[in-house]
Image: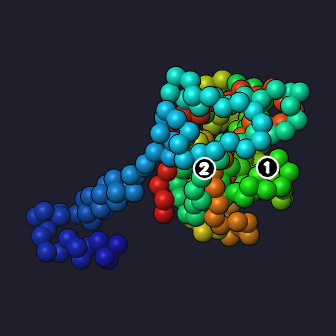
Amino acid sequence: RRHTRSLCDWSSDVCSSDLLCIALTSSTSSQAAEKFTRLWDGKSLAGWHVIGKGDWQMVDGAIRGKNVKAQQEFGHLVTDKSFRDFTIRLKYRAVSGNSGLYFRIEEKGFSGVTGFQAEIDPDKDAGGLYETNGRGWVSQPTPEAVKTWYLPGKWNEMTVEARGRDVTVWVNGKVSAKIKNDPGRIDGKFALQVHGSQDVEVWFKDIEIIER
C-alpha cells in the first residue's frame, strides 16, 4: 500500500485515492497477462500427433475423440512441443467414457503416457488431478463438489495453470484442484485422451495457452 501511495504523490488531482491507482494497475496487468495464443489451429492437427488407438477427427470446428469398448488400448492426441510453466484453457464436452487433459507428460508407460491429467468424465471427478503411472489420485473432488462446477452434457471450460511445482485447475471458473510444492514432473507435453476398454466420445475446442 505504501508503494501505491508513493506513485500517486506526484499528482493528487489525477490519483486522488490509492484505490484508483490500484484499479488502474490491476487492469493493465490483467490485460497484459491474458494474451492467450492458439495451441490448436482449429482446422488441422498441425503441431500434434496421435499415439495409441482411438479415432480423432475435426468436426464443425472442434476435435472429436472416440474409442470403443472392444479396444483395450488407450489413445492420445499429443503436442509435438514440450512446455514448462503455462496457463492452458480449453472447452470440452464429455458425451461418454473417460478422458482427460494431460500436461507435463512423457510418452511412455502403460496407456502410452506418464504424468498428470486434469480429469474429464461425463459423470464424476471432473477437474480432479490424477497421475498416470504414478501416484494415482493426487486431488480427487467429491461428487458434491463436482456438481457445483461441472455441467453434464454441455460445453465446459477447463483451465490448468502450472508454475514450478504449484498446479491449479479450474472448471467453469471454479477451482477444482490445487496442489503446492508437488514432487512430480515440471515439464513435458500436453495430450488429450480417449480411455481404453470404454465407449468414449469427447469433444474439444478453443485450446489456448500462455507460456510463462
Residue at mark 1: 112
Q: Which residue sits at x=59%, y=42%?
A: 158
- The answer to whether 52 is drawn above or below residue 138 in the figure is above
Quadrant assignment for the N terminus:
bottom left
Q: Which residue is mark 2?
A: 79
Q: How far is disc 2 from disc 1 in space, using C-alphas?
A: 14 Å
Res 127 → quadrant: top right
Q: Is residue 166 visible?
A: no
Residue at x-position 73% and y-position 66%: 184
Q: Position of residue 169 (x, y in %)?
A: 62, 50
Foreground of the two, 7 or 132: 132
Looking at numbered disc 1 in the image, what kind of residue is underneath it?
Answer: Gly
Q: Give, as a three-letter code, the residue at label 2.
A: Thr
> Going by the image, does 194 lie left or right of 164?
right
Q: Give percent across and percent down for residue 121.
A: 74, 34
Which is nearer the N-term, disc 2 or disc 1?
2
Residue 123 x %, y %: 76, 30
Q: As rendered, which of 75 and 128 lies closer to the eye?
A: 75
User: Is residue 77 shown left or right of residue 138?
Assistant: left
Q: Are marks 2 and 1 in contact (CB under 8 Å)?
A: no
- Write the residue at 43% across / 49% down: 36
Compare residues 14 and 85 and report the one nearer the observer.
Answer: 85
